[in-house]
Amino acid sequence: FTLTVTNNGPSDATGFTVEDILPSGYTYVSDNGAGATSESSGTVTWTGGSLSNGADASISITASVNAGGVYTNTATITSSNEDDPDPSDDQDSNTPVPVPQTDLSIVKTASDATPNVGDNVTFTLTVTNNGPSDATGFTVEDILPSGYTYVSDNGAGATSESSGTVTWT
């Protein structure tokens, strides 16, 4: 996040403090140290020096995106040495929209590694989501080789079979 403070005058500013309380969707990593900064439990406090009329100053805060939580981040000018005739612009928010990330993996096992011709073999498909987000709407396709004929499945989720291809949603 980049926070920019602009002095719209009419006088020079001799000091200001900005507070950015990172919401639960983020974890503080670092900042570029512009001015005097401190961080405590996800709250970044930036104390700026002098700012001439019409000038601006910025700080960049790096945060990691969590798998869940609130993503609207609000920064507020909490104090200044001089009176601010227009406090209506002393706060601003930004709401990035994180894209969920999943790490799906599949393991396929057989009930019998050396079946006799004519026996039934049960293949078990196990899907694991290593996150960090929840997985929704995934589809698994299992194409049985020509040496097997589909018999049935246990009906976990929505399954269908067509010409030896089992689709599990």
Image (tube, rainbow, N blue to C red):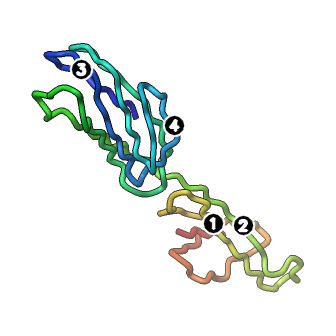
Bin the neighbour count of mark 4 within 10 Å (Cα to Cα): few under 14, some 14-19, many 20 and up.
some
Residue at 21 percent across and 34 percent down: it is 90
Q: Nearer the viewer, residue 32 or 153?
A: 32
Residue 51 vertical placement versus 47 (above, below)? above
According to the image, label 3 marks what residue? Answer: 13
Q: Residues within 10 Å of mark 1 (few under 14, many from 20)?
A: few
**Residue annotated with mark 4:** 30
Residue 142: % across, % down = 66, 66
Q: Residue at x 77, y 81 (%)?
A: 121
Q: Is residue 67 above or below residue 114?
A: above
Compute the Cα span from label 1 to label 4: 33 Å
Q: Nearer the viewer, residue 8 or 148?
A: 8
* Disc 2 from disc 1: Cα separation: 8 Å
What label does residue 128 carry, if any?
A: 1
Residue sitting at x 17%, y 16%: 11
Label annotation for residue 150:
none
